[in-house]
Amino acid sequence: MSFKFTVLAAAALVAANMASAQTAAPAAPKAPEPDYTISYNLGAVSDYRFRGISQTSKKPAIQGGADVAFKNGAYLGAWASNVNWVKDFNGATNGSLELDLYGGYKGELAKDVAFDVGVISYKYPGNNSGAAGTRGFGGFSNASTNEIYGAVTYGIYTAKYNRSVGDFLGNIKSSGSNYIDLSAAIDLGDSMTLTPHVGRQLVANSAAFSYTDYSLTLAKDLGNGVVLTLAATSTNAQTLSYTDFNGKTIATSAVLVGAKYSF
């Protein structure tokens, strides 16, 4: 093969490649990040537990909510569930629904360190908590409660602090009640996560209602927004303090199952 032929062949190849590059369709520009996203969730649990305490007198609950997340880190949300404790424990004649309204801001403090601060309002529409009078611990007021919160996550570990603004879940003169929550999200592989948790609820001016709760939750992500959970939970709450008007203790150990669909 002559040197001249080789040079001509190489030139032809370069020219062909240049022509191809010139005629190829340009890459589509990356879609801009939306200013906000909206997501929804629906679920069911065999027993709705809040900080280890049954909210449904150990009965099932149907739950659902919606969230708006803004690209700057701010968020708003609403979530609802049926409940029994406002009637069975606080003696109300009205109050079978819990509606949570919340908002806050998430961001990063450093590499692998995230934060979350916000406010949440636990609403029990129409509730008249305390209508049955006192229970020997000073009685109850309206069950609806407001809290401020802050959380820090490092890797798989999260520490969170909640503090009530006003009476806490109907406990009279309990403003400033607080809850400390420590948890870890352990990736087991195969779309499964194991989450150990310990929390300490301190009810202001009501030592009899303060307690520690523990839980261990296994979650399996089935894809398409479906997650199944199996959880074991327990507390060291005083039996007398957490026995309702029906004689049922709502702070006992339990094994719970749940399903949630997010879309």
Image (spheres, rainbow, N blue to C red):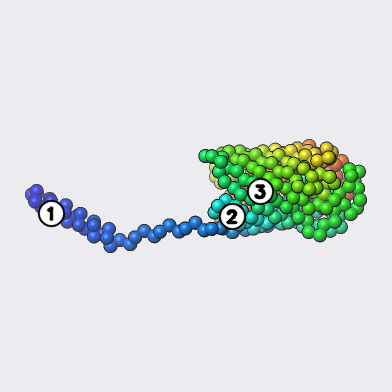
Q: Which residue is mark 1?
A: 8
The spot of residue 85 in percent (x, y) is 81, 51
Q: CA distance from mark 3 to mark 2?
A: 13 Å
Q: Which mark is residue 114?
A: none
Closer to the chain start, of discs 3 and 2, is 2
Q: Secondary structure at mark 3?
A: strand
Depth check, front residue: 163 or 236 = 163
Residue at the image point whose x is 61% and y is 53% from the top: 75
Q: Quadrant of residue 42?
A: bottom right
Q: Secondary structure at mark 1?
A: helix
Depth check, front residue: 219 or 4 = 4
Closer to the chain start, of discs 1 and 3, is 1
Foreground tag (3 vs 2): 3
Q: Which mark is residue 69?
A: 2
Q: Quadrant of residue 71?
A: bottom right
Going by the numbered disc 1, the residue's amino acid type is: Leu
Residue at the image point whose x is 27% and y is 58% from the top: 21
Going by the numbered disc 2, the residue's amino acid type is: Ala
Q: Secondary structure at mark 2?
A: strand
Q: Which mark is residue 118?
A: 3
| Disc 3 packing (10 Å; few <14; some 14–19; many ≥20) | some
Depth check, front residue: 35 or 220 = 35
Instruction: Check the image and report above or below for 183 versus 99.
Output: above
The spot of residue 53 in percent (x, y) is 77, 45
Residue at the image point whose x is 34% and y is 60% from the top: 26
Foreground tag (1 vs 2): 2
Query: Going by the image, does 221 lie left or right of 139?
Result: left
Q: CA distance from mark 1 to mark 2?
A: 60 Å
Q: CA distance from mark 1 to mark 3?
A: 70 Å
Going by the numbered disc 3, the residue's amino acid type is: Gly
Foreground tag (1 vs 3): 3
